[in-house]
Image: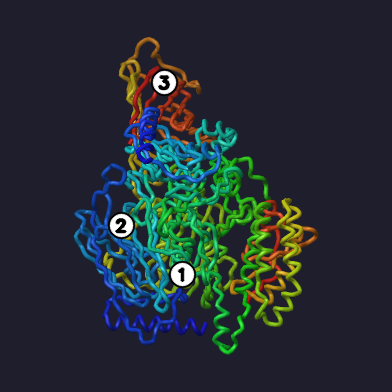
Amino acid sequence: MYLLRILRALALLITLLYLLLSGDVFAQTGTPGHALGTSTPDRSFTPRTTRYELTVRDTIVNYTGKARKAFTVNGQMPMPTLTFTEGDTAEIVVHNAMEKEETSLHWHGLILPYQYDGVPYLTTAPIKAGETQVYKFALLQSGTYWYHSHTKLQEQNGMHGALIIQKRNEDPMPEQVLILSEWTDMKPFEVHRRLHSANDWSAIKKHRIRPGTVQSYSDAIKDGALGVKLTNEWKRMNAMDVSDVYYDLLFANGKPVDEAPQFKAGERVRVRLINGGASSYFWITYAGGKMTVVASDGIDVEPVEVDRFIMGIAETYDIIVTIPADSTAYELLATSEDRVRSTSLWLGNGIKQLAAPLQPLKYFAGMKMMNDMIKMNGDLDDMGMNMSLQQMDMNVVMYPEITGAKASEHADHGDDKYNSNALSNIVTLNYAMLRSPTSTALPPGPVKEMRFELTGNMNRYLWAIDNKTVSETDRILIRKGENVRIILYNNSMMRHPMHLHGHFFRVVNGQGDHAPLKNVLDIMPMETDTIEFAATETGDWFFHCHILYHMMSGMGRVFTYEGTAPNPVLPDAKKAARHFARDDKEWHFMVQNDFATNGNDGEAMYMNKRWNLQSEWRLGYMEDHGQEVETHFGRYFGKMQWLFVNAGLDWRTREAHNGNDPEDNLFGQTNTKNSRSVGHIGFQYTLPMLLVLDLRIDTDGQLRSQLMREDIPLTPRLRLDLMGNSDLEYMGRFRYVLDKSWALSTHYDSDMGLGVGVMVSY
Amino acid sequence: MKGLLSLIALPALLLFSSCSAQLKNVQTTTVRIDGDCPMCEKTIEKGAYVKGEAEADWDVDAKTARITIDSTRTDMDAVLQRIAHAGYDNERYLAPDVAYAALPGCCQYERTFQQKPMTIPGAAADHSGHDHGHDAPATNAPQVTSESLGPVFDAYFALKDALVASDARKAAAQAAEFSAAVKAVPMEGMDADLHTVWMREMELLANTSAGIATKTNLEEQRKAFAELTEPMFALMKARPTATPIYLDHCPMYEGGADWLSRDKAIRNPFYGAQMMSCGSVKETIVK
């Protein structure tokens, strides 16, 4: 503790000295809560300023034969690696040379005054087109970090780069940076919009590389897992997504494959790995033997030898590997969690030693596991396993290298059923294995404890904490000097890399005072993890899921220090707050229409996370087929959003002649469909098997009850829609999906008869 | 001679190109690929084949393959990478060890492309010997440190790992190495304490390990392996290494048995995957 105090005093001294010399306006409050891997500073040390000039431009790139927009900094994508030495002052001048778009840069994992944290409208002013902003702060830490845009979805298209801070007093060893990222030809805006309309084109694309990804009925029958698929739909789940987005390419330092031939046999190399992806987890394996993990999120851990580890989005790991033999290059392989694609870095020069590729996932084994874990109300049930810290990985049932090639091979191992390291010879890193070399015990102080339940659903892509998004909650007040403890429970079906800005938290993992420090915590479904940090700063700090599309959907919270003075860089606090909250309030538009031989049939939706304005139409070409438009507006309820309460208008007309007389409905009410213009109120509710029950009453007192199931995946591309209602109307449609926008269809409709057509969707 | 060869090769090439009529923009190369038997031929050719893109014809005697590709759709590198993933080393790629190990016994060819691994100095990070030298420069006799017992320790852990993996063949091979390592330890310069321990345990270690090397039955190997724990523990206690060593205890095997490990995580050599994490750390040997 005494040493720690000296270290802190020294850090403070450096900071003060720097402030004195630079005459900076902002008081630097960023004193590390812990000795953040700080080596003892040199007493003769005088601060040095390292300056970078960064120019952000938008540009056109072409990776797959298609020209696409992307962002570059100083002409590079990913952005250039910024290198500093601990104790330096960083001075980074950012020019926004774009014509219209604003931007921002966030220094991920750095301890700095919050005004420099780079979250636009929350801590920092956005950098408008044509503007220049200067970031200037002291570097109180060392290690592997990164920086990225925090504006909209810019991070996906190139705005991510490595930021390395070398230790002051350490002999350098051979080292190599590896920043991982993804590329999609689809515009990120489009990716985001489609995620919100439960479009599974991504899965179909993946299916072409890894058959089985769509998890259609035909796939289930092939795998002898029809019962599993039926149970899954009974529990109202769509196909399981291991990751949401299809990527055309994965990148190692911006290239499909990168090479580092400078290393010689016998050398030990420190590889600084950064997951700069927007939504992909990466498995890391190495062809030249074991890897020794020596740091995580920039902070040293006691060396631990592993065969592989998974990198959550935004996590960094430092590993030490050896180059075993001469004239050989060894593959450091990064495979996306869905195992659809991989990228590599070759270490050494010569014949290439491959690492073993990761075999395809056993999707139905995973689906069976999910079925066992999910309750009818959508809650997860860990069946008393007290899961935490990645130790029990439910996904092992899908990994052939751990649980055998076939689904049936996974025998019951009792308590070890999901313990990867107990089931096989392969050592997989988990958080319980990380140990800090120094004590990270928090200083004494009052404890503020809170519980966060991570919630969400795939169908409408709502991601939240306690079913509330950033814009739906107030900022959480914390007080300088207290210790903040957060108990996280993941009650959603996806894993989430939760990131805290401007602080390192201890991951309470059974290592006592030596709990490791991190700033990103990957939490798997059903896990409960505890993190805690000393509140040593001031200002506003974002805590959010680092899956870009989850963050933009509102999965996060803001911590605000009590008594923080008004932020000088955001003078209009109210306006800024409104702007900041805008991200997860976004409205998305989707529309589809079936141009068929017997009429036009389609729907349009304009929706946000809770509300939906929906319109459906059936427009026959023949007068006696009639024309019909229904429009309603309503709100979704519950975290699974199975209930949709709405009100709207119905309008229909049809030429009256033989056979088009007023009809009785199932409730014995008589109505004419020849001319009707009424209002209605009602609700939709998603039943088991994903059947949507639609009950409504209109202003004429007519009742209508309708059952509908859309998008039954018979095969990966062949889909079936079914509908029937109490007005004795029914419809059945087969669709064959051609691509993300086009499908062929044939349908039979009680009003319009048989038709074939072409369906377009946006 | 060269002229003659090309005279033979040219019509062969023409014949071949006409055979693979489905490939367009044909580019053909002959590449050396390691392998042993007709079964290898099948695996290599299947690994290379992609309809309309690439095919290979491997010759078991020459150990070369003629690879034909549609150069607009793929490249040689991709084909060679696939062949290596199927388990076969070639000019550009070495197969993943797992893929090689999965080949049937008759296909376990000699890996001539592989370079000999360097022994990495200081990898075990034990510099105690050097420090000693500084403190007592007058003593010229070589000190036996854990470094010179290092090969014995390494061989023990390799044998243990083979048993964890339930690989009887590998265990026999590692036991033979272990036995050789024991015999190779120089006794000159051992200090008195270590010398006593070494004299007491050496014979048991050499004999037991030699015994394991002759056995092919995993159960017998494991039973004999349990006998190595006590003497190894005594040696490791006498010469602890820089990295900790764990004495693990399995309460189930033969009414309770111990083994030694460098990993803190339990990986049971008596049961392997059947009960991988059965056991607990009983003692930690640290320097």
Real-space Cα separation, disc 3 to disc 1, in angstroms: 63 Å
Q: Secondary structure at mark 3?
A: strand
What residue did someone put label 1 on?
Answer: A299
Mark toward the start of the polypeptide (2 vs 3): 2
Residue A155 as seen in the image, left or right of residue A721? left
Task: Give the letter of the chain under mark 2.
Answer: A
Q: Residue furthest bottom?
A: B138
Amino acid type, label 3: Asp
Q: Is residue A234 above or below residue A273?
A: above
What residue did someone put label 3 on?
Answer: A749
Residue A34 on image: x %, y %? 47, 75
Could you tell me how many numbered marks the image carries?
A: 3
Task: Give the letter of the chain under mark 1.
Answer: A
**Badges 2 and 1, same chain:** yes
What residue did someone put label 2 on?
Answer: A579
What residue is shown at x 32% (from left), y 81% (from top)? A47
